[in-house]
Image (cartoon, helix red, strand yellow):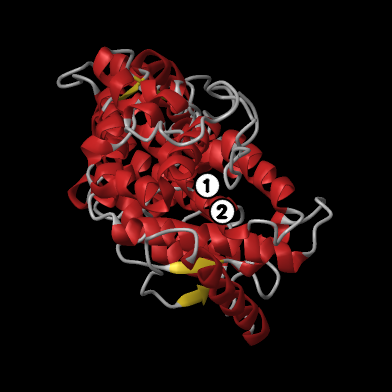
């Protein structure tokens, strides 16, 4: 190896290959650099698998360089536009659902506001997964190394860390450096926290509202839109921003009405996410290989590792059932919102169909940040069968009115399951509402769209 060695270690001197003395000052400087990075992890595992102060600091730093209006306080003009849109949305929704408006005041958030408001719930969702990642990192890196000879111990080091050390290292010095093997867990805490902060910053640029992802991200009610992201949503679709803002306000207000007036929904959805997260496992074989190749002179190497898809759901009946419950519940939330919003709009917005399809495509595929975030925590929050769920709620509404549709949320036992979403019109028949005019089309067809009524 020639040239400078990572972290400033000196190489053997001329004429002394493999036998050069340590440059002790360089060794001290190297360990000081590594220590500064470790310091970011705080007390590591004693404080938990994620350093949330570091997450917040990293996320805010990622947003700090953006143009004014993205992270700074929202302008009064933008705030007024959001409040007006939400006020009109509530007037339209009053005639479309039996659930009254949320008691929360409509707000306009910056991206930094979204970050601060959602961090407590992200902590609840992410920590169980992070705990397994960090624990596995410590196991892979340290192993059972007690009493290992110096030569074998040096070979056990990850390649990048091993390359920091000059050849001919003495057994005494190697023994002094053995604690470095235990640093991997602390490094993993810092790396995961930095990666999570970067992921949340990226996600904050994509979400348009407090309820946009479809899961509870606030501990209390909040009706909020992010003006900067609302503008981004409308880029390239050729629709007036006022109509886009109103449509997204309708969706946001409908989401918040549902969560505000269905007391079991928040806990049930959070529980479904946590049950699925408990079944996430770490690909140990892949991690062992990756850890061995980490360049310890590059702190970002660990960040790339923890976000490289090492987390995978277990292929068990229990995990598949947990995923099915989560996907079905997410689809039901989205389907109900679709039908309520379409019914509220009626013939008022000519662009409603185009906006609905834009949202459907967005929810079906997710944005780049959401896909990256899914790779980091091993959890994709992608609802399936949204169209089928919307058809089911439209069928129940057409046959029994909004009260029959909304009444399904009175108890979780009344809710449709995955089989019902596969045949939504049959579910409506089973409710005893079949004496109304039959609906055209087969289950899953687009003949009956949310907000539409069957022909007389």
For residue 153, above or below residue 189: above
Q: Is residue 186 above or below residue 146?
A: below
In this view of the protein, which residue sits in the foreground, 105 or 88?
88
Can you see residue 47? yes
**Would you call the spot at circle 2 few (<14 residues within 10 Å), some (14-19), or many (20 or more)?**
many
24 left or right, relative to 230: left
Residue 127, percent from left and from top: 28, 44
Query: Where residue 387 appears, x then y in whole percent?
Result: 55, 33
Left or right, 18 with reference to 186: right
Percent x, y of residue 104: 39, 74
Q: Residue furthest bottom?
A: 76
Q: Is residue 268 above or below residue 403?
A: above
Given contact means CB atoms under 8 Å apart, are the residues at marks 2 and 1 in contact?
A: yes
Most distant residue in the left direction: 147
Identify the residue shown where x is 63% and y is 45%: 359
- Give me the residue at 29% from left, 51% from top: 266
- Give neighbour class at mark 1: few <14, some 14-19, many 20+ (Cα, 10 Å): many
Q: Quick one: SS at disc 2?
A: helix
Q: Quadrant of residue 257?
A: bottom left
Count numbered badges in the picture: 2
Quadrant in which the C terminus appears:
top right
Q: Residue at x 38, y 69 (%)?
A: 102
Q: Quadrant of the N terminus?
A: top right
How far apart, in angstroms, are the residues tagged by discs 2 and 1? 6 Å
Residue 242: which numbered mark, if any?
Answer: none
Which residue position is annotated with label 1? Answer: 339
Per the image, the residue denoted by label 2 is: 343
Judged from the image, the secondary structure of the residue bearing numbered disc 1 is: helix
Q: Nearer the viewer, residue 80 or 177?
A: 80
Q: Quadrant of residue 205?
A: bottom right
Whether residue 28 can be seen here: no
């Amino acid at each position: 190896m020639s040239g400078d060695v990572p972290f400033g270690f000196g190489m053997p001197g001329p004429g002394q290959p493999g036998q050069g003395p340590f440059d002790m000052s360089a060794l001290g400087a190297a360990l000081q650099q590594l220590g500064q990075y470790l310091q970011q992890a705080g007390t590591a595992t004693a404080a938990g698998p994620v350093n949330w102060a570091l997450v917040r600091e990293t996320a805010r730093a990622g947003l700090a360089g953006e143009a004014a209006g993205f992270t700074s306080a929202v302008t009064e003009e933008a705030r007024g536009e959001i409040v007006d849109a939400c006020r009109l949305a509530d007037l339209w929704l009053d005639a479309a659902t039996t659930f009254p408006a949320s008691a929360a005041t409509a707000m306009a958030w910056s991206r930094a506001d979204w970050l601060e408001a959602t961090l407590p719930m992200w902590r609840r969702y992410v920590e169980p997964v992070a705990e397994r990642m960090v624990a596995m990192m410590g196991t892979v890196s340290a192993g059972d190394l007690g009493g290992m000879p110096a030569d074998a111990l040096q070979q056990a080091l990850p390649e990048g860390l091993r390359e920091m050390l000059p050849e001919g290292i003495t057994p005494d010095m190697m023994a002094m450096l053995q604690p470095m093997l235990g640093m991997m867990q602390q490094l993993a805490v810092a790396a995961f926290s930095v990666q999570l902060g970067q992921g949340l910053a990226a996600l904050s640029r994509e979400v348009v509202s407090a309820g946009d992802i479809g899961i509870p991200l606030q501990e209390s009610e909040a009706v909020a839109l992010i003006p900067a992201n609302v503008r981004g949503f409308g880029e390239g679709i050729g629709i007036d921003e006022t109509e886009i803002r109103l449509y997204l306000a309708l969706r946001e207000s409908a989401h918040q009405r549902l969560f505000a007036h269905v007391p079991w929904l928040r806990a049930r959805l959070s529980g479904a996410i946590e049950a699925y997260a408990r079944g996430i496992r770490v690909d140990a074989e892949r991690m062992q290989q990756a850890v061995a190749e980490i360049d310890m002179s590059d702190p970002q190497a660990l960040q790339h590792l923890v976000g490289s898809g090492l987390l995978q759901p277990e292929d068990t009946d229990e995990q598949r059932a947990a995923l099915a419950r989560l996907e079905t519940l997410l689809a039901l939330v989205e389907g109900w919102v679709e039908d309520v919003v379409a019914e509220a709009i009626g013939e008022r917005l000519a662009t409603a169909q185009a906006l609905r399809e834009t949202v459907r495509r967005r929810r079906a595929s997710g944005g780049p940040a959401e896909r990256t975030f899914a790779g980091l925590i091993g959890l994709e929050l992608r609802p399936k069968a949204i169209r089928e769920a919307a058809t089911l709620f439209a069928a129940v509404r057409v046959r029994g009115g909004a009260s029959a549709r909304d009444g399904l949320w009175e108890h979780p036992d009344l809710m449709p399951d995955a089989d019902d979403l596969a045949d939504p019109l049959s579910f409506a028949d089973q409710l005893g509402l079949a004496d109304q005019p039959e609906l055209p089309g087969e289950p899953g067809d687009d003949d009956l769209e949310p907000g539409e009524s069957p022909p007389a």
